Image (cartoon, rainbow, N blue to C red):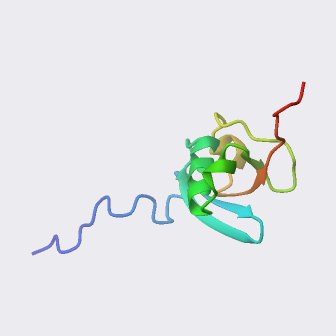
């Protein structure tokens, strides 16, 4: 009669194995949203999630980028979250409208 609630796989990383996921908070305008991502997830994965989470209009979505809070350098989409978190279990990023390249020579 054991086996009542084995629940294996119900919640990947329920907070015990902080090494397997990173809690990412993204700030945009006056709002913040948080989601957990695998440490190997890429910045582009967070950007895709954030655009949806903040209901960013498709017309400006291509101009949106992520930066580490307190910096202004755009993060490359191919960078992993683990490389940004430096061993920490949480990361805070800002969603900003980048430079518009149209017409710049």
Q: Say which of 41 and 66 sits in front.
A: 66
Rendering quarter of residue 102: top right
From this view, report whether residue 34 is shown above or below residue 100.
below
Residue 13: image x %, image y %? 45, 59
Q: Is residue 19 left or right of residue 99?
A: left
Residue 76 visible to the viewer: yes
Q: Say which of 20 and 91 sits in front.
A: 91
Q: Give the quarter of the figure containing the N terminus.
A: bottom left
Residue 86 visible to the viewer: no
At 17% from the left edge and 75% from the top edge, which residue is drawn? 4
Residue 50: image x %, image y %? 61, 56
Query: Which residue sits furthest left?
Result: 1
At 87% from the left edge and 50% from the top edge, which residue is drawn? 71
Q: Say which of 83 and 58 sits in front.
A: 58
Q: Is residue 35 left or right of residue 67?
A: left
Residue 10: image x %, image y %? 33, 63
At 50% from the left edge and 58% from the top edge, which residue is drawn? 17
From this view, report whether residue 24 is shown above or below residue 87.
below
Q: Give the quarter of the figure containing the C terminus.
A: top right
Count of labels in the image? 0
Rendering quarter of residue 53: bottom right
Q: Is residue 32 left or right of residue 19?
A: right
Q: Say which of 96 and 4 sits in front.
A: 96
Query: Which residue sits furthest right?
Result: 105
Query: Which residue sits furthest front?
Result: 103
């Amino acid at each position: 009669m054991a086996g009542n609630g084995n629940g294996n796989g119900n919640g990947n990383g329920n907070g015990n194995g902080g090494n397997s996921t990173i809690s990412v908070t993204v700030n945009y305008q006056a709002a913040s949203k948080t989601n957990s991502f695998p440490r190997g997830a890429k910045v582009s994965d967070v950007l895709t999630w954030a655009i949806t989470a903040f209901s960013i209009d498709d017309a400006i979505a291509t101009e949106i980028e992520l930066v580490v809070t307190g910096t202004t350098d755009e993060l490359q989409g191919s960078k992993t979250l683990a490389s940004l978190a430096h061993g920490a279990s949480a990361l805070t990023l800002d969603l900003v409208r980048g430079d518009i390249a149209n017409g710049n020579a």
